[in-house]
Image: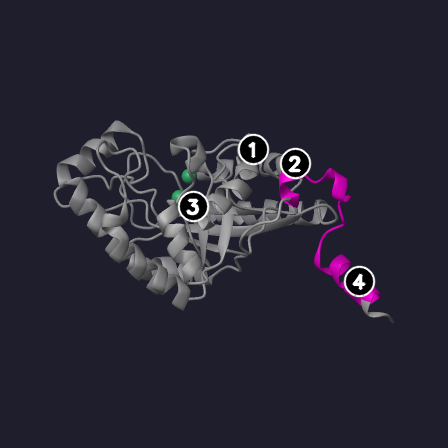
Amino acid sequence: MSATRLILMELFISFPKETPDLLFPYYMKTPLPCNFSLQSDGHVHTKYCHHATGEMESYVLSAINAGLKEIVFLEHMEAGVHYFETTWLTEKDFDIYFAEGKLLQDKYRDTIRVSLGVEVGYSPSHKEELLERLTKRKWDRVGVSYHFMSLPDQQYHPNLVSRNKKNIRAIEKAGSGKVLDNYFSTLLEAVKVLPGTVLCHLDAALRFQPGITINKHYLEPIKSILEAVKEKGMALEINTSGFTIRDIPFPAPFIVKEALKMDIPLLPGSDAHNPEDVGRKFALLPDYLKSITE
Ligand SMILES: [Zn+2]
Ligand SMILES: [Zn+2]
């Protein structure tokens, strides 16, 4: 058998049915300055986390419509959180998520790869529980985040990425600077402790806090986190929800530059909480990556 034929066969084995090149959106054909796939949305949610909308199948159809070859569901797991609403999946929810996800994997096998992962929010006081729950299932991807922080004298754990006034006020009361220092040191612990494969939205914490910008002042703690990411063989997420919130993805260019210097792989994710947002703003990524690597 000729070498070309072997290579062609490999292509057919490793990808779902080939989509004719013409059908790919134009931006997927743009050469990129680093090893980065625009054909996979690595971070979408489902209605099972109670703050996203849309059936899992609608997300898959939206991904197909966007010309993607893979969609990665990355659903919220949290432990030991005191909050005024539930914004994560229970173990029962995860059972349904897996059952439905597996049906979709089969149904769309020839068109798109459907991957089932988890976005695990770290909790220093409940790390054993998280580790036990993570070991129980076979995840295609484990995203590491840190959303809810326990603060002294406060009944609820504020959500660090929320625009809700209750969270903003609680963070203000504890001192935004202190909260941010704690965020970085605890996120470093999360990367070291959890069996993560990708670090999600690194600098999204306190994104709605007035007067707070994560800039080069925080380079040292961020570098330590990236070193741990590198050590664990993890990737860094380029979260395109940032384009909607602040015109650039999470994390900021100075962080992406550091990651590229360290040869940390980058993975794009839309963080879609509704089907329409699958692959959101991916078309902006080629130019964006070029602008920060020049
Ligand atoms: Zn969410
Ligand atoms: Zn998140």
The residue pinned by badge 1 equals 275
> Residue 292 location in percent, x, y?
44, 46
Q: CA distance from mark 4 to mark 2?
A: 27 Å
Secondary structure of the residue carrying numbered label 4:
helix
Disc 3 to disc 1, how far (Cα)?
Answer: 17 Å
The reply to whether discs 2 and 1 touch (Cβ–Cβ < 8 Å) is yes
Magenta stretch: helix, strand or loop mostly:
helix
Whether residue 150 is visible here, answered yes or no, is no
| Res. 219 visible in picture | yes
Circle 4 residue = 9
**Residue 169 placement (x, y as % from top left):** 19, 31
Give the class, few, some or many, for how many residues have Cα within 10 Å of label 3's Cα (few <14, many ≥20).
Answer: many
Q: CA distance from mark 3 to mark 2?
A: 21 Å
Label 2 residue SS: helix
Q: Quadrant of residue 65?
A: top right
**Residue 209 painted magenta:** no
User: Which of these two is toward me, 288 or 24?
Assistant: 288
The disc at residue 58 is none
Question: Label for residue 61?
Answer: 2
Q: Which residue is mark 3?
A: 76
- Categorize mark 1 by other alpha carbons within 10 Å: few (<14), some (14-19), many (20+): many
The residue stretch that appears in magenta = 4-29
